[in-house]
Amino acid sequence: MLALARVLGYLLALVAGVTAGVLGSFTFAYMRGPLPVGLLVALCLCLAAFVTSGLLLRSRAAAVVAASGWLVSVGLLSMQRPEGDLIVPATTLGYCWWGPLWPDFPWPCRTPR
């Protein structure tokens, strides 16, 4: 019974990551003046989904599962459809939404190795 609850927990973590990715992909471009409010809200939502998943299941693997769901959903929404539609465009905000999970993202504090 405990193993079934654990599997359901990981499944819920995956669903939380996918949901955060889809919702964030549709809201990240909202601007209020010069402030990217949508991006900030979307990143907070993702952080909440990842941290909550990890804390509820008491494992880092749950946070990784949630992040994997986010990565897949945002990756699929970043691809151009045959009709030409694109949810996450290659703009500065799009790179800020998509970029932080990539290892070669140009972090300002990163030093070359």
Image: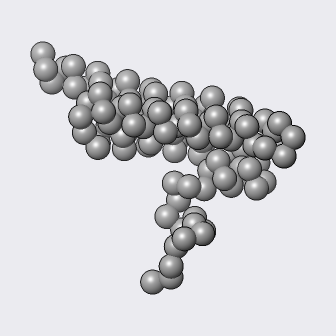
Answer left or right for 109 relative to 10. Answer: right
Answer left or right for 83 relative to 14. Answer: right
On screen, 101 above or below 112? above
| Residue placed most toward the observer, 71 or 107 | 107
| Residue placed most toward the observer, 83 or 112 | 112
x and y percentages locating residue 111 in the rendered image: 50, 79
Quarter of the rendering occupied by the C terminus: bottom left
Q: Residue at x 44, y 42 (%)?
A: 67
x and y percentages locating residue 81 in the rendered image: 74, 40
Q: Residue at x 52, y 73 (%)?
A: 110
On screen, 25 above or below 9? below
Quarter assignment of residue 44: top right
Kindly give the residue lying farthest to the right in the view shown.
Answer: 33
Q: Is residue 87 visible?
A: no
Q: Is residue 70 visible?
A: yes
Quarter of the rendering occupied by the N terminus: top left
Answer left or right for 76 relative to 30. Answer: left
x and y percentages locating residue 16 in the rendered image: 46, 28
Q: Residue at x 73, y 37 (%)?
A: 37
| Residue placed most toward the observer, 40 or 12 | 40
Kindly give the residue lying farthest to the left in the view shown.
Answer: 1
x and y percentages locating residue 26 in the rendered image: 71, 32
Quarter assignment of residue 86: top right
On screen, 98 above or below 55? below
